[in-house]
Image (cartoon, rainbow, N blue to C red):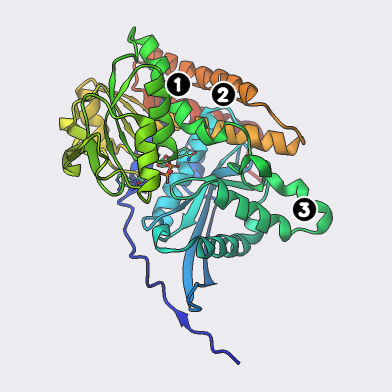
Amino acid sequence: MATMTVIPKKKTKKVPAKGMMDNVMQQFSIAADYIDLHPNIRKILSITNNEIIVNFPVKMDNGEVEIFTGYRVQHNNALGPYKGGLRYHPTVDIDAARALAMWMTWKTSLAGLPYGGGKGGIQLDPSKYSKGELERITRRFTFALADNIGPEHDIPAPDVNTNSQTMAWIADTYMSMRPPAERTANQHVVTGKPEGSGGLEGRDRATGYGVFLNIKFWSEKNNQSIKDKKFIVQGFGNVGFWAAHFLEKEGAKMAAVQDAFGSIENQNGITVEDLFNYSKANNGSIVDFPEAETLDSKHFFATDCDICIPAALGNQITKDNAATIKATLIAEGANGPTNVEGEQILLKRNIAIIPDILCNSGGVVGSYFEWLQNRNGELWQFDEVIAKLDKKMKESFNKVFEYAQREGLDMRTAAYCIAIQRIEKAYIQRGIFP
Ligand code: NAD
């Protein structure tokens, strides 16, 4: 009989997520104080409903077995099933999953969707694994989560280092675990699937397009034009690329980009499509792109520009760099990119921030459309998706902008107030069981 060796997680070094939970709790407290949130509901929303941690073995290409740790945190489901992405990254831990799940609760509530908030992922660096290993890791993680996810219970989606392929593996594994008569009826267990497997046309660009729309709406309210504006993007993945693509189409110039490998700058403009093709051929890295100069990553946020789009990880704009930021508008593509201390510095400097729970909500709105499409057995057309997305994003932006103006608040606090009040109302109407 062949012997099986079990080895500990050797490949992924744990990197702490640096207090994302502190950040989301501080943001929540500021808004909860402002609206004088009912103390019982404050207690409920300050904690997560369920936290699932799974350790599971996966056979590697070399025959050895590696143990992985996966997380799924379900923060709140007062408004509907838990909804939120799965991230594959060394910073994924319980603190990050809790914080990201909470942000999803505020985001889905603000967008007026029938969802709550959840988030999870696996602590690993996917660049160190083959496609076959990633498939087995994803399928085994889905199996380990088992009945903790489901199309009417908790619906994952892509996030950092996961994509439509990851979602297809999850859907296939989940459906394979159902009784035969229920299999296809469970396709909406995840959103962000490939178009050939129940995915929604346009879901790929929904988050970045939503970031662009928010910048456009903000510019219109401030009598500004996007044309000839210079922008910088941190993270040139799904969100960063699509946001840059639509801004460039509207006449703006991409002056600098940072990814996990390095930073580049060209004040005359970096062509978005060229950089995308270059990075695709360069293992996903923008480094040494021939049409730009190398930029010291430490000074990335101090680069000359009008608009800054953090579209990578959390806690990137802090007291250490907020004072040197040149942009007059920060559009948060990422979740939690600005911490409270950094934000206070920015607000004192009159730098506007379109907060994550509004700015990047195009993704979850697109996911909601995909979920409806699958649930109703429909196939939506691209133009229809974009028209519905435009409408929903405009409603959310106007709601937040008007609340902020009326109350004299920054846009983040306004967005939180609206989101929390919707959940508070649901709890007050239904009461607390028993
Ligand atoms: P992605 O994996 O497609 O891309 C991530 C990008 O960030 C890559 O270019 C990567 O190189 C870069 N990056 C990673 N670590 C970095 C670091 N330390 N410094 C600079 N760059 C770094 O991920 P994505 O889906 O584009 O997600 C980006 C952000 O947007 C995340 O915060 C995610 O939670 C948020 N978001 C994503 C969606 C979605 O639909 N994908 C929706 C809402 C919010």
Q: Residue at x 38, y 47 (%)?
A: 281
Number of marks present in the image shown: 3
Observer-nearest of 205 and 143 = 205
Return the x and y of residue 231 as percentages of the image width and height: 29, 26
Q: Which residue is mark 1?
A: 213
Observer-nearest of 337 and 173 = 173
Q: Quarter of the image holding residue 138?
A: bottom right
Crowd band around label 3 with a 10 angstrom C-alpha radius: few (<14), some (14–19), many (20+)? some
Circle 1: element type: helix
Return the x and y of residue 75 as percentages of the image width and height: 52, 47
Task: Look at the image and tell me whether residue 234 can be seen.
Answer: yes
Task: Look at the image and tell me whether residue 427 can be seen.
Answer: no
Kind of residue indicated by mark 3: Arg
- Badge 2 vs badge 1, beta-carbon distance below 8 Å: yes
Return the x and y of residue 309 as percentages of the image width and height: 33, 31
- Badge 1 vs badge 3, beta-carbon distance below 8 Å: no
Kind of residue indicated by mark 1: Leu
Observer-nearest of 228 and 420 = 228
